[in-house]
Image: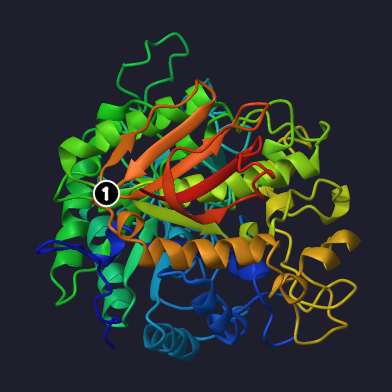
Amino acid sequence: MSAPGASAASTGLLTEPWWRGAVTYQVYIRSFADGNGDGVGDLRGLRQKLGYLADLGVDAIWLNPCFPSPMADAGYDISDYRDIEPSFGTLAEMDALIADAHERGIRILLDIVPNHCSDRHPRFQEALAAAPRSPQRSWFWFRPGRGPNGDEPPNNWRSHFGGPAWTRVTEPDGTPGQWYLHLFASEQPDFNWENPAVREDFLRTLRFWFDRGVDGFRIDSAALLVKDPLLPDLDPQAPADAEHPHNDRDGIHEIYQEWRAVADSYEEPRVLFGEVWIAEPGRFAKYLRPQEMHAAFNFPFLQCAWDPAALRTVIERTMAFHRPVGAPATWVLSNHDVTRHVTRYGRAETTFDFDDRGHGRPVDFELGRRRARAAALLCLSLPGGAYLYQGEELGLWEVEEIPDELRDDPMWHRTAGENPGRDGCRVPLPWSGGQAPFGFSADADAQPWLPVQPASWRDYSVEVQLGDPGSMLELYRTALTVRKTEPGFSSEREALRWLESGPDVLAFRRGEDAACIVNLSAEPVALPAHESVLLVSAPLTEDGLLPSDSAVWLRLS
């Protein structure tokens, strides 16, 4: 099964690989479209909506994990890396999806989880049944506990979902036994990447999917795989530049060099995109060296406040630390783990922080949508690749009014409700109709797996927005068309050059004559001399000024 033909832009004699400037659409498959009417999004539903995504203008689709899983963490607890979760479909349906997408010129990226698996994975079940220090247990991090009877965890590491990062097992003879490491939920034991068998098994998984035509992988929690084998306590007083016992350790780069060699071995090389949460630019850039990942997500931009100085700083820093390694920057506003940006931009505090999601604080949704429209034009005009999270093209917001008994996220359960979790950005999409589930399911009477859709979403469905020139959906459709056809925006290699502007305005040129102006001030501002207006996020004033919290694309004189 072959990938779609090259759709690269050209700069002189230089042809760009497709991934350098691609617009990738993230599909959270459980909530995208339900094709078989059971209330859970699936591959059939996604195949039925490929025309929608092609018309939107995306270059690739990234699917959140679709492998067999008990769903303790929405599919990020994988029990078989070489099959499809039955509630999502079959291997044959995945093959058909890849073929259909390729016919439309759309690439398919899967989400792989190398740090941990499900506690139902056969390898972990074998480890539980085996003796301490056995080869089966060497696939994971099993250790004796501390204290007189081994009743205390081996160290003080904490789970990212709350609580200790260790769980004690009962040995086959019924006695309290060793502890195993899980940096996330207890149902997600961490692999031991010191074991060569783990490395080889994942290389087989990469080849399995690449051979089926998958164009690449998004790598979950990419910096966490390698641990200090001594498993020392985490020192809260350690300086910021001290080596971390389980994050961003130097040995990790050898792993991704092996993965890159596999990806490059195909006639059309496959691609690797990393989820790398590392604040220090120099450390981050190491993952993007020519023989490692092709790109990594730009989280400082996602977390940035709606503030001109902060945005300019993060854009400049992003360009600066990508330049030496020759990797393209990436730009993203939302994903399945963070509060939707319509909500963030409508609050007094517009940044994002995992430890303080702002849940329940007042939101000015009109302001949030206005800023989100401007942010879309900013994001899509910057050099590099862009990632869209399903529903952002509809202007959807975070759903915070979810009854406790319906919440699914382990973040909520492991923190006893202290952390509201991520369910609010994972609510099923509204496609059509005047009442929930808004065309999400093939069976109108089916209850979605997360049955919380605000009644007001009827006004934000795909059906309502299609053809409405003032809608968020049509703004995105037009922006993706202009991005492809306007030379300054279409080439990832066209440099960004700042234009003179006021302190509360971001203004830059791409190529010879394309420009983006974003007004973050409280008053309308004048536009630079230009030949034509390509696109605006909000109508210009009667005297041709750009309103507050708005953006415009120009063709300069």
Residue 227, above or below 39: above
Residue 183, above or below 241: below
Residue pictured at 30% horizontal, 62% vertical: 19
Residue 155 in the image, given as x and y percentages of width and height: 47, 25
User: In the displayed structure, does residue 501 sit left or right of residue 204?
Assistant: right
Q: Quadrant of residue 229?
A: top left
Q: How did the renderer colour the structure?
A: rainbow
Residue pictured at 84% horizontal, 74% vertical: 447
Please name whichever residue, 257 or 401, is drawn nearer the observer in this view of the structure.
401
Residue pictured at 41% horizontal, 83% vertical: 98
> Would you say residue 535 is visible in this rendering?
yes
Please name whichever residue, 514 or 474, is drawn nearer the observer in this view of the structure.
514
Disc 1 marks which amino acid? Answer: Glu
Q: Which residue is mark 1?
A: 512
* Outermost residue to the front: 543
> Would you say residue 229 is visible in this rendering?
no
User: In the displayed structure, does residue 180 sit left or right of residue 6?
Assistant: right
Q: Quadrant of residue 108?
A: bottom left
Residue pictured at 76% horizontal, 32% vertical: 418
Question: How crowded is the residue under tag 1: few (<14 C-alpha within 10 Å), some, or many (20+)?
Answer: few
Residue 223 in the image, given as x and y percentages of width and height: 35, 40
Residue 323, above or below 444: above
For the image, the number of numbered tags is 1
Residue 251 in the image, given as x and y percentages of width and height: 21, 38
